[in-house]
Amino acid sequence: MKINIHYAFLPHTDADAALAFYRDALGFEVRNDVGYDGLRWLTVGPAGQPETSIVLHPPATDPGITEDERRTILELIAKGSYGALTLATDDVDELFDHLVAQGADVVQEPMDQPYGVRDCAFRDPAGNLLRINQAG
């Protein structure tokens, strides 16, 4: 039996800013761009890996949550404490330099971690934390 990660979900607070980051800065393919009731869901993913995608979704749209819950979610997103994702690349230093040149929000410059990984970190336009590991 084989199991893959098919979709991961991250909130976005501005679809155009999310596209600029994920498509233009990271170079991900746009696989779907769906609008409904004034909101947009974007599906992006790395070229050549159609089985793995990130769905960037409008936050706090579930009809089952209360206004207090919605407010809390939006506050957590604004603080950068809601969503996170770890990516991997064959050259973390090169990708770091590229993202800095694109104006990405740096959280941590590339460094060797005590747990054996070299990585860096950024926040996407919504505040989601993206760690980027050097692939082994």
Image (cartoon, helix red, strand yellow):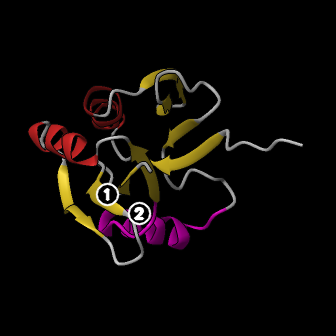
In the displayed orientation, state which residue is furthest to the right: 1
Residue at image coords 25%, 32%: 25
Name the image quarter holding the N terminus. top right
Q: Residue at x 18, y 53 (%)?
A: 105
Residue sitting nearer the eye, 40 or 52: 52
Across and down, in percent, residue 79 comes to: 31, 69
Tag on residue 74?
Answer: 2
Cα–Cα gap, marks 1 and 2? 11 Å
Q: Position of residue 61 (x, y in %)?
A: 56, 50
Q: Main secondary structure of the magenta part?
A: helix
- The residue depicted at 67 percent of the width and 38 percent of the height is 6
* Residue 104: image tag: none
Magenta stretch bounds: 65-83
What residue type is disc 1 on?
Answer: Gly
Q: Secondary structure at mark 1?
A: loop
Q: Residue at x 46, y 60 (%)?
A: 83
Amino acid, disc 2? Leu
Q: Quarter-wise, where is residue 28 in the image?
A: top left
In the image, taking residue 37 as reference, residue 101 lies left or right, namely left
Label ID, residue 127: 1
Q: Is residue 35 above or below residue 117?
A: above
Image x and y of residue 75, in percent: 37, 69
- Give yes or no for residue 78 being in the magenta stretch: yes
